[in-house]
Amino acid sequence: MISQQNQRPEKTTNTTPKRQGLLDKIKKNKIAYLYVLPAMLVVLMISLGPILYGIGLSFFNANLYTMGQGTVKFVGLRNYFRAIGSMDAEFLIVLFRTFIWTIVNVFFHVSIGLIIAIALNRPKLRGKGIYRTLVILPWAVPQFVTALVWKMMYNEQFGFFNQILEMMGIPAVSWTSHAGMAFVSAIIVNIWLGFPFMTMVATGALQSIPRDYYEAADIDGASGWQKFKNITIPLLKPAMLPATILGTIWTFTNFNVIYLITGGGPGKATEIVSTYQFNILTQQNAYSMAATYSVIVSIILIIITAINMRVTKALSQEGVE
Amino acid sequence: MNYRLKEKMSYFLTHLFMITACLITLIPIWWVLHTAFDNRTSMVSTEITLFPKNPTLDNFIEVLTHPSFLTWLRNSFIFSAGTTIFCLALATLAAYAFSRFNFPGKRAGLVSFVVYMMLPATASLVPQLMLIKVLGIKNTYISLILIWSAANMAFAVWNLKGYFDTIPKSIEEAAIVDGASKLQIFTLIMLPLAKPALAITAIFIFTVPWTDYVTSYLFLTDGSMYTLAQGLFGWAADFRTVSWGVFSAGSIIMALPLTIIYLAFQKYIVSGLTVGGVKG
């Protein structure tokens, strides 16, 4: 106890800045700048510079053709109007599809992840360790590999799913060549990939809830639903909300699943923003348009993050009171 | 009695539910293992067995003697290891400075990393292509090591800074009393103490080049520089080039090391992701 009390005032004196000239401070910390410099330089030259250049590109009409001809010129906000205006409704459809993709996926990630975590948290369940390991496998295997494996399983002629259906005498399904079905197929893969992360986060949070809470609730005669609603959910929130924000961003920007399973096709029926941008860049070489889409997407992501942070903050303050 | 029966029943249902969930997660993994260890030459089969009828290592032997596969494996390893070493070295230095020095511009530097993470990273692809051309390092290891390092730097710095912050300052103060220099404190005290965080950050960085398809596709046009991700993508796009068995064996070789590491360090990785991710 005594040592703890002693430590506290010491800490506060440490953090109060001593009055010093700025130059002295810089001189005194010369070595710190030396440590930070290499990392800063790499980011600045290789990443930040190009990003800023790219944002700049979105105000020009650069593509393979104009760059070859030397006719690149400033076009102001024209690319942005083209992207969100009526001239290019395609992007708006892609954007709308990306929102559906994100909402459906995150909903299933969180709900399935939570249900499995709750099942795994039952006190007298045997074989927990084995179940846990098997259930998180989709998270542990690199996404790139599993997406390719799913693609082969979806193969119409020789894939696993149609083989099973054939054995059962059910006609084959066009998993990736029918517009609506292809989107569903990709969502199935992404749900499979994404729920284990939520299970892991929720398991960690559930384990930190004291069992006494539930026992006390039992004594008070609370029902299972009441316990879930009034004990489990509020105590899970601090861990699950950040994970959900993260999951939302990951899903919104996910490239591998759609690109590897459907390639954005058939036609452009399953294109989401990340694959759309990539295809615009690689197939049409429309550099400025691709940059414009990047800027729009990151503005959307910043808005999503800001809203989420606000909600999280509000909720965490609620918890303090 | 009635209560006990009810409880037994509910545990039975829980087991049933968990077994179903595990089956669903296992099917694709079982399928790829099955295909890799199967010696079937024809893809059409009328029966599905739990284990391959005639288990064989032929597919693994074929993939490991395939000249391009070995090149891809080597390239992927050089890219991933190179990026990990380079990025981690710079990030550790920066994170240490951010954690332990109180220098003017520190806050601005840290905040700039956060702002930078929100910028449209994909907008940088075309300018980066131009930059690589101007520097004359197209199709070289160093080009993508630089790009992947820059892309992971902010996350790595934040992650490591967070860990350095948790190491008590009293340890260094004792070392200063003993006459250790700043560099000695860093290399002999801080680095060994930060081993767990360094390991986890290294895993994160290593994974990116190992599994990234977009960057290598855009930047590498020379076939001898292709990575595993590019190679396997090509195999999957046209299964006439190699059999599914060989593809599956290749996938397993690509996935296994990371899978084992992720399973072994799962707890640290998840907390690293949520903490570092939200901070960033």
Image (spheres, helix red, strand yellow):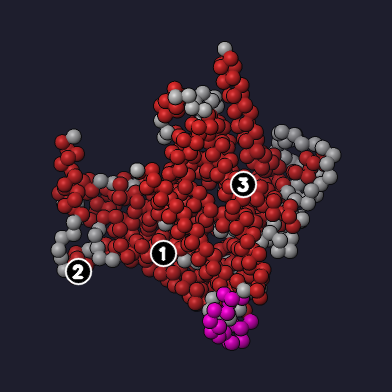
Q: Is disc 1 placed on a helix, strand or loop?
A: helix
Q: Which label was assigned to residue A191?
A: 3
Please indicate, yes or no, whether residue A242 appears anywhere in the rendered image. Answer: yes
Figure check: B216 above or below B77:
below
Rounded to the nearest angstrom, the CA distance separating label 1 from label 3 is 30 Å
Of labels 1 and 2, the one closer to you: 1
Q: Magenta residues, as a range?
A: A65-82
Residue tagged 1: B115
**Which image quarter holds the N terminus of chain A?**
top left
Q: Residue at x 66, y 64 (%)?
A: A93
Figure check: A28 above or below B165:
below
Rounded to the nearest angstrom, the CA distance separating label 1 from label 2 is 25 Å
**Total number of numbered discs in the rendering:** 3
Do discs 1 and 2 belong to a common subunit? no
Q: Position of residue A94 (x, y in %)?
A: 64, 63
The mark that comes first in sequence, 3 or 2, is 2
Q: Nearer the viewer, residue A166 or A10?
A: A10
Left or right: residue A178 versus residue A235 is: right
Q: Position of residue B82 (x, y in %)?
A: 46, 58
Q: Are marks 1 and 2 in contact (CB under 8 Å)?
A: no
Q: Position of residue B274 (x, y in %)?
A: 44, 48
To which chain does the residue with label 1 belong?
B
Dot 2 amino acid type = Leu
